[in-house]
Image (cartoon, helix red, strand yellow):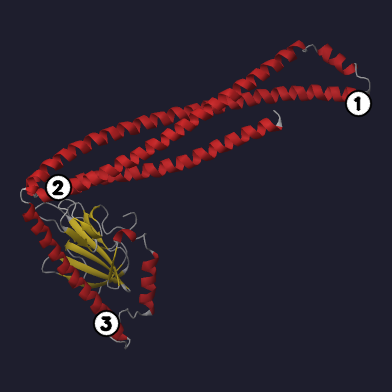
Amino acid sequence: MNLKHFTVLLLVLMTSVNHHIFAQKDQEQLEQRRQALQKEIDQINTLVIKGKTEQKSVLSQIEDLDLKLRVRQNLIEVTNEQINLLTRQINNNQVQIARMRKELQKRKDEYATMIVRSFKARNEQSKLMFVLSAENFQQAYLRLRYIKQYANYQKQQADLIAEQTEALQLKTKDLLAQKSEKDKLISVNREAKRLIELERETNRVLIAELTKNLSTYERQIAQKQKESNAIDKEIASLIREAREKSNTAVGKSATSKSFSLTPEDKALAASFAANNGKLPWPVEKGVVVLRFGKQAHPVVKTAIIDSQGVRIATPEGENVRAVFQGEVYAIMAPKYGNTTIMIQHGNYFTIYRNLTEISVKKGDKVSAKQSIGRVLKNNSNGESVLNFSVFMDTKPQNPANWIYKM
């Protein structure tokens, strides 16, 4: 094999390997995302859409289905991305296989021609005569060297053909595996689309029923928001109180807009901030059913929800745990809600609402993942939902930016 052929083959193989590695990485990331979405759908089925439907209002049933539809639509989109990526990989592999077959056939033809020539000149006596008929010793030496090089070249060509044949077989096997995976994903997507149509039909029926009493549901949503706002005000008041105490302790003005922290509390706050995006979930099992921030109600679009945290549906009696070390600043029993625990981490606070079986008291030092209580079950609809918030000073933070893979 000459240097030109070797270089071209090496470049083709390197390009193929690099492309395969990057495509495989993308495919693995998409598959992880797809599995996470499927797990979320399973959790919605078991943690959200549960209990007898007559226990839930039409509004609650639609909210549950709407959440599931949004996640299932994401699942379909991710699966489509996987299918499209596989299609590109398959097309690329088919082009490479065609090129490799052409190169292999060309090499086989060259090798066959070479073997025929060798066969015609296979007589050892003719080789000997070829060497002995040289005009001088140097020419005889060069002829002998040429014979050896030609034999080595024959062996190299045979080895190269074997290697190319093996590479072609592996590439073909890879192609068949990709086609099989694509067919599997198409089947998964077809089933997901079938289910989403069934769920949409159920949703349409429920929405038709809901629109008959739309004004009633709007008032219910507004009342819930009013109650949530009242709890948020209590929390904000307690955080301001904590800030005033920290400032008074060092002789600063109680009206200062920043916390005066001890060196220990500064270190704690810095450690909390350093774990942005790495904090554990406040429950071991759960699915987010309401995200952070202002948003239109998923069903009654005229209603606006302002959420200073997230709502996490959990199994019944799920254990609630502190997401980071700190001190229990307050245990509240709000007028419009259930037991709420505030844990202070320097000038950061984490808030856990809708608890029962409290296992800590005010002033307790807690560690990360330490149990602080359990999620309270709503007997009227069978739901177990934890409200979780993060504050920096008095500013609510998006928990999804703090909790690992939320």
Above or below 23: residue 309: below
Of badges 2 and 1, the one in the foreground is 2
The residues bearing labels 2 and 1 have C-alpha atoms spaced at a distance of 95 Å
Secondary structure under tag 1 reads helix
Asked if the residues shown at circle 3 and circle 2 are in contact, with their CB atoms under 8 angstroms apart, the answer is no
- In the image shown, does 68 or 165 lie closer to the viewer? 68
Quick check: can you spot residue 104? yes
Quarter occupied by the N terminus: top right
Q: Name the residue under label 2.
A: 62
Q: In this view, does 146 lie above or below 338?
A: above
Q: Name the residue under label 1.
A: 138
- Using residue 151 as the reference point, say whether residue 354 is left or right of it: left
Provide the secondary structure element on which disc 2 rests.
helix
Q: Position of residue 14 (x, y in %)?
A: 58, 38
Q: Residues within 10 Å of mark 1 (few under 14, many from 20)?
A: few
Q: How far apart are the alpha carbons under marks 3 and 1?
A: 102 Å
- Measured as percent of width and height from the top left, residue 75 is found at 30, 42
Do tag 3 and tag 1 residues touch (Cβ < 8 Å)? Answer: no
Say which label, 3 or 2, has the lower sequence index. 2
* Mark 3 crowdedness (10 Å alpha carbons): few <14, some 14-19, many ≥20: some
Task: Return the residue at label 3.
Answer: 245
Q: Could you tell me residue 304's position as x and y percent?
A: 18, 59
Q: Residue at x 6, y 46 (%)?
A: 54
Q: Residue at x 28, y 32 (%)?
A: 190
Horizontal arrangement in the rendering, residue 318 relative to residue 382 (left or right):
right
Residue drawn where x is 56% and y is 23% of the image? 101
The amino acid type, in three-letter code, at marker 2 is Ile
